Every structure is written in structure tokens, then in C-alpha cells.
Image (spheres, helix red, strand yellow):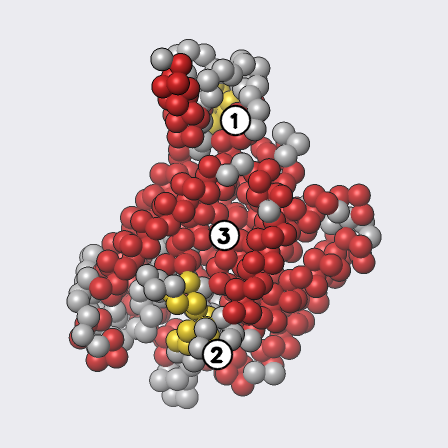
Amino acid sequence: MSAPASAWQRMAGWFGGLPGKAADVLPVRIGGTEYRRTTATPARVLGFDQALLWVVVALLAWGLVMVYSASIAMPDNPRFGKIAPTHFLLRHVFALVMAFVAALLAFQIPMATWERSARVLFLFSLALLVAVLIPHVGTVVNGARRWLSLGVMNFQPSELAKFAVLVYAADYMCRKMDVKERFFRAVLPMGAAVAVVGGLLLAEPDMGAFMVIAVIAMGILFLGGVNARMFFLIAAVLVAAFAMMVMMSDWRRERIFAYLDPWSAKHALGKGYQLSHSLIAIGRGEIFGVGLGGSVEKLHWLPEAHTDFLLAVIGEEFGLVGVLTLIVMFLWMTRRIMHIGRQAIALDRVFSGLVAQGVAIWMGFQAFINMGVNLGALPTKGLTLPLMSFGGSAILMNLVALAVVLRVDYENKLLMRGGRV
């Protein structure tokens, strides 16, 4: 009976976070409640942050419903050819299934393995970013070369690059702890790595992904303890660089002008078209919305309603109440992930803590940009709403990143009750 018993113990460790033998050393605090390891404490309490998991599941489920609602009328558009009303829904379900499998596998990987593999993962992501630019290898959609065709789905290497830079930056700061006060030895190499990634992304072009990656790297440098003067110097350089990119690009400059006046005759049917129809959709929703499925703007008026402008459809169908609920959910999720990161650093697990906090920056910043664009507070930028918008590779990497956060939380609790990771 020893072999079956050990197998059950391993399964309990994987899914419940409870090893076969654990010492009662420190309390475990979950959501403001303190638990001690006793025979009466169930494994599900001592495993990982279940509140975070259920919020993520709620966002995924809501996103699935909204993708179907936003895309149900697309078969009527000749641009998409002869597709079924459930075409995008089924593809999104398939992406979710693949993402859940990938997340389960990612959760099994110890954080020590992620730390050892950080540089290899970063180099692999660079190789994919180069491959996508090769003619007949990268797939071109709407004039942008951002995807690699994998048969069952199109994969966007920039999504992997976000995660790879995040893990690499956390590992880099752990290796440079002794020289973090010296600019050329601590910051410059990391800046060069981000610049290489940025150059490849701008060649696609994908300025939105570059912005997210730059903010992730900057956030981890700041949280890792880089000198404040150096941090603000790098921030100023980045802002100046993005401003130069906008000024040197006619179509990017036109987007800024359209953002400033989307209702003018010049922009309403041009660069300001998406923004103006997004604002119309949100305005139609008023306080409580027109009801699920009742959106008019998704009927070929609002482009990319199921991807970049999903929030506009949510605002039209669920109103201000729905938008505020979504904002609160993302705020809570970001704060919870940050707490897990701080807890890891308090346990002297700096790499794990920086990775978790990097994921919080990623999810929070990208959601902020997407919401700001949909609400007209920021210029139009092609970034999806994390966990909700249609997009297989984005959903895949979002769930892998969140699985790594849950792994950090699992290892935190394991250490706090006297176990080993």
C-alpha cells in the first residue's frame, strides 16, 4: 500500500498544496484570516490563493460571454467570409482550454527552475521575435507582421516576450543586487536588452507591446531597489523615446490628433472612427446598460469590438455599473498579486516576489491602457483587455503568468508552515 499512498500524497501536493509531512511552525494568512496547520485545516485552505483563482475564472467567463456577444453578427460582414455565428466563440473556447492546460503545467514548475531558465527563455523569445519578421514565416494581418502560424492557432511572440522579459528582469535584479547603485553595471545591460526587444517589436510594428514590456522592466528595476535618480533618468529617456517615435511617424501623430478631437469632420471617419463609436457605445449604455446582446455598435459600426474594444460593448450592454464592476475586479486582482509578491520578498524569496509583482504591473498597466483607450482618456492603442478579449496567445500567456503567481503563493505558504520548496 506504500506506493499508492505516496502517489496520493504527490497529487495532494500538486493540487491542494499540502505535502505529506509539514511542521506547524508559522501561521498562514489568507485574505486577512489567520490559519494554523492542524488536522482540522483542510488542504484547500493551505494550498494557494483561491480568491484570486475565482476572480480570474470570473473574468474569463465574463470575457467568454462578451466575445460571443460582440462577434455574433460578424457572419453578416463580407470581410469575414462564410463563418458561423459561433466561429469566434469556439475559437475562444479552444484557446481557453489550451491556456488552462498550459497553466496547469506551469504551476507544476518550481520557481527555482524558472530562475535557472530565465536567460534561456529570454533568448528563445528573441528568436521568435526575429522569426516573425522573416518573409513567409511571419503571418501578416492588417498590415502588421506579428503572428506565427502553428496550424491550430496563430501565436503572437510579443505575448511570450512580455513574460520572458518579466522573468529575465527579475533574475537580472537578483544577480545585480550588489551593484544596483551603479548605473553602467546595474541598469545599462538591462536597458540594452529591452532596447533590442523594442527594436524587434517596432519592426512588426507593435508599439503597444513595447510600451507594456518597457513598463514591466522599469517596474521590476524600481521594485528591485534601483537608485531613484537612475530610475527617473531612465523613465525620462523612455518618455522622450516614445515621444520621438510618435513625432517621426505620420500615422501615430494622426492618432494623437484624432484622440484630441475625434468628432471633427477630418477624424470622425478616419483615425477617430473607433474612438468616436466606442464613446457612442458607452454613452448608450448609461447607468445600467441596454442588456446583454442589445448592443447596436457591435453590428459592424465599432471595429474590433471582440478584441481591443470589448470594454465598449460591455459598457453599452452593462452600463456604468458593468464598467465599474470590471475596474474593481482588475484593481482587486492587481492588489492581490502585489501582496503575494511582497509576501515572497518578506520570506527572502526576492526572485519569486519580483516575478509576482511584475505580473501585477503587466495585468494592471495593460488593463489601464485598454480601459483608458475605450473610455477616450488615452490615444488609441492596439492592446487587448487581459483575460477577456479575443486572442489565443494573449489568453495563453496571461494564464501561464497567473499560474506562476499561484505557484509563488503556494511556495510562500509551504515555507510558512515549515515545508521546503
Q: Is residue 366 left or right of residue 100?
A: right
* Residue behind mark 2: 135
- Identify the residue at image location x=53%, y=13%: 24
Tell me if label 1 and label 3 are in contact, CB under 8 Å.
no
Circle 1 Cα neighbour tier, 10 Å, few/some/many (<14 / 14–19 / ≥20): many
Nearer-N-terminus badge (3/2):
2
Q: Amino acid at mark 1?
A: Lys
Percent across and percent down for residue 280 are 31, 71
Q: Secondary structure at mark 3?
A: helix
Asked if residue 232 shows in the view, the reply is no
User: What x and y, as percent, mark residue 168?
Assistant: 62, 51
Question: Which mark identifies residue 364?
Answer: 3
Q: Is residue 344 above or below residue 75?
A: above
Of marks 1 and 3, the one in the foreground: 1
- Element class at badge 1: helix
Q: Quadrant of the N terminus?
A: top left
Count residues near mark 2 (Cα–Cα under 10 Å), then give few for <14, some for 14-19, many for 20+.
few
Task: Determine the CA span between mark 3 and mark 2.
Answer: 34 Å
On the image, the x and y values in percent for residue 247 come to: 60, 81
**Residue under the image location 38 percent in, 88 percent down:** 265
- Marks 1 and 2, Cα distance to the nearest angstrom? 48 Å
Q: Which mark is residue 32?
A: none
Residue toward you, 247 or 41: 41
What residue is drawn where x is 28% and y is 60%? 91
- Measured along the vertical axis of the image, is residue 103 above or below residue 313? above
Q: Mark 2: which amino acid? A: Pro
What residue would you read off at disc 1? 413
First reached walking from the N terminus: tag 1 or tag 2 = 2
Disc 3 residue type? Gly
Q: Mark 3 or mark 1, which is nearer the start of the sequence?
A: 3
Classify mark 2: helix, strand or loop: loop
Residue 376: quarter of image: bottom left
